Image (tube, rainbow, N blue to C red):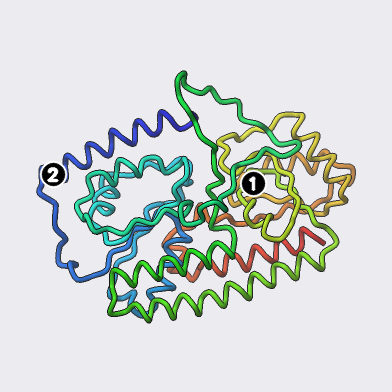
Amino acid sequence: MKKLIACLLAGLMIIGALTACSSTNATTKTSNDNKLSVVCTIFPEYDWVREILGSHGYDGEVTMLLDNGVDLHSYQPTADDIIKISTCDMFIYVGGESDQWVTDALKEAKNKDMVVINLLDVLGDTVKEEEVVEGMESEDEETPEGSDDGPEYDEHVWLSLKNAKTYCNYIASKLGEIDSANASDYSANADAYGKKLDQLDESYQQVVDSSKQDAVLFGDRFPFRYLADDYGLTYYAAFVGCSAETEASFGTIAFLSKKVDELGLGTVLTIEGTKHKIAETIVQNTKAKDQAIQTMDSMQSTTSKDAESGTTYFSIMQKNLEVLKDALN
């Protein structure tokens, strides 16, 4: 398994952190005892919780662990992260292969009443397995002898507005169980936010329905499968969403360049990041060599500082819609 070594290192770190907690008797909360404490792994969860808390956010503490732009797939918790998780009231994480460290982190949780939300579990049977589509680089992985790996799921569940609404309603209900005095407010906030998500969802569908194209092409990883499936889009990409690869083969470049020509695409898409070498190479190998390169944000590098500057899950999805509109026309 590609993350086996990382998981072993994470396990050792977690054991050390928990030992440190035990030696200092850090088993109780500080002066923030009466504050609702929610720990989230990624930005979308963090922003959803803030939306649901609304005015009650001032009475709580919401923490985002992946707050320095590190990618979900390479994140490993610090000792401070483990302590925060151990004592919080609610912990929200994605639940895919990248989060295997969570199991050990929760075993020794000091707060036995903690509410734990696994996003993949909330979706249940609607979670999608990662798929390798035509022309995409496949990852040749060595599976440890005797291991029994199950399916590898696409972790990028937050990139569906429909999923986001489901999550917000679920989170609101669980916050209401923890803080029953404000349960009706959490429910009302989730309902209001859900209506905004519905409107944006309708806008996406309208854009797709009225566009010339029904396919997108990424010279990059492709974490947008849930979004593509929501609106019936066909996609081509260099890598699957959770791939750790950074170099594409000649065959992949050639296939994607030819596909741009065949479909008459005017845009090659990428995800956030400063280097778009693969997309640039694809464009250079097309007949026209004049396609635009645009970025759709998968929110894997968004930080709380971005949030303080006004960035929200909703605003990013609005910008993604504008990029998608250009790419389909």
For marks 1 and 2, the one nearer the N-term is 2
Counting from the top left corner in percent of width and height, residue 216 is at: 75, 52
Residue 67 in view in this figure = no
Relative height, residue 2 to residue 329 (above, below): above
In the structure shown, which secondary structural element does the residue marked by tag 1 occupy? strand
**133 horizontally vs 178: left or right:** right
Using the image as rendered, state which of residue 16 and residue 151 is in the foreground: 151
Q: Residues within 10 Å of mark 2 (few under 14, many from 20)?
A: few
Residue at the image position 66 percent from the left and 44 percent from the top? 276
Which label is found at residue 88? none
Label 2: which residue?
22
Q: Which mark is residue 222?
A: 1
Q: Nearer the viewer, residue 13 or 122?
A: 122
Q: In the rendering, at what x and y percent does residue 88 appear?
A: 26, 59
**Is residue 20 placed above or below 8 in the rendered structure?**
below
- For label 2, the SS is helix
Looking at this rendering, what residue extends furthest in the top direction? Answer: 145
Residue 32 appears left or right of 46: left
Q: Position of residue 73 (x, y in %)?
A: 48, 42
115 lies above or below 259: below
Residue type, label 2? Ser
Q: Residue at x 31, y 59 (%)?
A: 115
* Callout 1 amino acid: Phe
- In the rendered image, the quadrant that contains the C terminus is bottom right
Q: Is residue 156 at least partly visible in the picture?
A: yes
Q: Going 74% across and 33% down the picture, which residue do you hit?
A: 252
In the displayed structure, does residue 126 sit left or right of residue 177?
Answer: right
Which residue occupies the extreme front position in the image?
A: 125
Q: Where residue 142 appears, x then y in whole percent?
A: 53, 22
